[in-house]
Amino acid sequence: MTDEASAFVPGHVTGFFSVERTDDPTTTGSRGGGLALTDGVRVTVRPAEETTVVLDDVGVEIGAVDRVLDALGAQATVIGETDLPIGAGFGVSGAMALGTALAGNAVFDRRLLRDELVTIAHGAEVQAGTGLGDVVAQAAGGITLRLEPGGPMENRLDAIPARSRVEYVTFGELDTATVISGDTDRLTLAGEEALSTVVAEPTVSEFMYAARKFAREANLLTAEVRDVITDVSAANGEASMAMLGETVFALGDGLSSAGYEPQVCQVDPAGATLVDDRDVDGEITGRSADGSE
Amino acid sequence: MTDEASAFVPGHVTGFFSVERTDDPTTTGSRGGGLALTDGVRVTVRPAEETTVVLDDVGVEIGAVDRVLDALGAQATVIGETDLPIGAGFGVSGAMALGTALAGNAVFDRRLLRDELVTIAHGAEVQAGTGLGDVVAQAAGGITLRLEPGGPMENRLDAIPARSRVEYVTFGELDTATVISGDTDRLTLAGEEALSTVVAEPTVSEFMYAARKFAREANLLTAEVRDVITDVSAANGEASMAMLGETVFALGDGLSSAGYEPQVCQVDPAGATLVDDRDVDGEITGRSADGSE
């Protein structure tokens, strides 16, 4: 057993989604589409007598992380570090769960396959009620289309073969659990239409168009988010709302061209990975924002 | 239509494999396991009146590339640049095919999904007889286990959730087409046993053990390769032979500790990606060898 292990998990903004519930967490999930981001969460796991979870130096309760540690049969100190806003639609809870699974497997020498770990993290997030599709997309990286819901043994993913700079601004939190546990029929209908549109025309521009249409039809736009998206469109940019947070994300320099001062990152092609500090000279806390790898 | 587009495709060393043939190139392929490498091929595609293919400034004929361009209905100048040895077991032909598919889709605005492009490149490589499993592993990145053969719509991939520094030395070429078109019963039996071993114990150490056993049982070791692997083992390192080339690859500093002067790279977690030069300040010709992304 090593002393600790770390994983980097990209952030993930969902542009559109449907809710697909079954009796089994591994087949429950969402269809939809989203962007994995080079801004993400670094998760470090250390064996401990009693589990504690810390996110950006603050003690937190994250149900999905506890469930992952239960599945691994382990107690640990889990330390998350991120520049992402929390509770604002970037999949931080999914990143914590998946990072705990990957780093926990390494530090406790559990010898599980990658998709077993992703399944554990996906199931934990579904059971905790904090997400439906972030984990599998964060594991895959890129601009993922979730064609069939569920964990990696059950689902079907494809992707838009593209990269992009991504800008984002956040105004506050939305409670994922409240939205996805409510009446989701209208949302799911809009999400499935958006997915069909993008599968027929898998470009980033079509993705953004479908995401804007989804946000409107699913009645999720707040006034502030709508105003910012309108400003970006007026400056000939492409923006939409991150599901689920009071967050606007844009391609290229969409937000800065419209006069905002956004955070800047890139689509992360890699997905979640262990951080192998033994072989690295410099610091790894994520991937560089300018995409120069 | 843009003027040109580029993709980076990681190199891929297969440690063990089986040959699984059907009448359909999308279900034909190999089971097995291998490492995607940060040393890879940058492929640039430019529309042209007549197709020409250049690899490291030399005009070449690569059947899989011609077939990919046929599938895209396009004529192009395809320019490959790589530091990898050619014909030595690093999947350069697969990288050229997959890079042509990804960059060709972008430059000719074909609007295909990622897995459609991977399917085209995989089928092209199978039909050209130059590979069976590199393309799908190069698309995925990481330490891929190919549990079921074929293109991405048909196969089943998983992975060892680990990273590593990788060293390699090359002594010469082996002709993949000759080996995989011959009698492969013994090789396939050894490859399926190796895969079972690694699935039961998915660690990099077990991977290397299974790869060495496979190389011996499939009768593919050359004298020089066997000697180098023995030297690395004597220095407490882990090495095996790249399928199919007269190449030895080792984890960590296995080769340098044994007194060799190897090339050094890392397991590439990302898999094949478009290179988005518009948003990049520095040069992208691959990923840095020290893993600092």
Image (spheres, coloured by chain):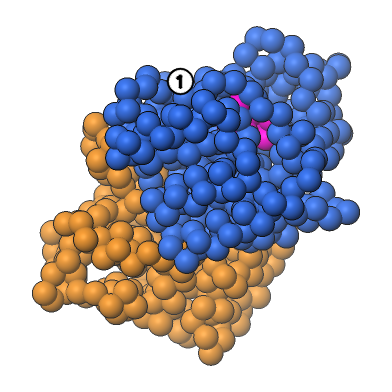
Chain colours: A blue, B orange
Please give the range of residues in magenta. A88-95
In this rendering, the answer to whether B78 lies above or below A255 is below
On screen, residue B41 versus residue A281, left or right, reads: left
Residue B277 drawn above or below residue B201: above
Q: Position of residue A137 (x, y in %)?
A: 59, 46
* Image-quadrant location for residue B278: top left
Are there few (<14), some (14-19), or many (20+) residues within 10 Å of tag 1? few
Callout 1: SS: loop
Question: In front here: A185 or B184?
Answer: A185
Q: Where B196 falls versus A63 (above or below)?
A: below
* Image x and y of residue A16, in percent: 58, 47
Residue drawn at x 86%, y 16% as measured from the top left: A49
> Label 1 lies in what chain?
A
Work out whether residue A255 can be spotted.
Answer: yes
**B62 or B242: nearer the viewer:** B62
Magenta span has A220? no
Q: Circle 1 is placed at which residue position?
A: A283
